[in-house]
Amino acid sequence: MSKKQLVLVYFGNEGAADEAVNAVKQWDKATKEIKLGAIGILVKDKTGKVKTQKVGKRNTGVGAILGVIAAVLSGGISLLGGIVGGSIIGALFHKGLGISKEQMAKIDGYLNDGKAAVGVLVKAEEAEAVTTKLTELGGMAAESYEVAEEIVEEAVAAAEAEPAPQE
């Protein structure tokens, strides 16, 4: 079973995370060795609920995985643009999302005070370069989690099965 890495790098605010995403997308286009998929951003809203902002299609691997993380951090209840099926969230989380309860608490803590996390799902051999690039762009407290390809596929399938959020 193939493994991917979920790289999470934290930024001081959502604007800085957006700027980093734009820079990483340009770097991706200019670098033959790195070919990234979608990138997502995790933030807390004013009520403390974690939300995802996908950069690209909502059913991509990183969007689906970040949707699971946001759902877990928000108590598994309905999320705009995320996975809403509580049983799906639980199954994916317990099957091996690769993030412990302690690590989830750490992620939650990093998102306080308007901070944001940029999440990128990459091939294992790309994780170090992506982490380095996001850190150069002002990111801090970089973390990487191993995620089985099977989990990514199940998260994508679950996201595709959910109705699109109403604008």
Image (spheres, rainbow, N blue to C red):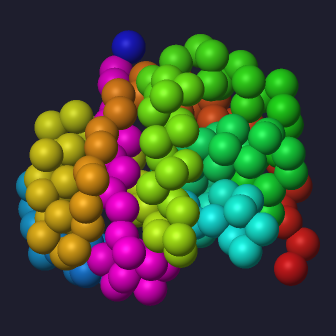
Q: Is residue 134 above or below residue 123?
A: below
Q: Is residue 95 left or right of residue 159?
A: left
Q: Is residue 12 above or below residue 131?
A: below
All told, the count of numbered labels is: 0
Is residue 33 highlighted in magenta?
A: no
Q: Is residue 27 above or below residue 38?
A: below
Q: Which residues are magenta?
A: 2-21
Is residue 19 highlighted in magenta?
A: yes
The residue sitting at 36% across, 62% down in the picture is 10
The residue sitting at 37% across, 42% down in the picture is 6
Q: Quadrant of residue 98?
A: top left
Query: Where is residue 69 drawn, in percent x and y?
Result: 60, 42
Quadrant in the picture for the N terminus: top left
Quadrant in the picture for the C terminus: bottom right
The residue sitting at 32% across, 57% down in the picture is 9
Question: Can I make out residue 149 in this image?
Answer: no
Q: Is residue 111 left or right of residue 160?
A: left
Which one is nearer the viewer's eye here, 1 or 71? 71
Q: Is residue 128 above or below residue 96?
A: below
The residue sitting at 51% across, 60% down in the picture is 111
Query: Where is residue 14 drawn, in percent x and y?
Result: 48, 78
Question: Can I make out residue 113 in this image?
Answer: yes
Q: Is residue 81 left or right of residue 24?
A: right
Query: Where is residue 99 drawn, in percent x and y?
Result: 47, 28
Query: Where is residue 116 drawn, in percent x and y?
Result: 47, 67
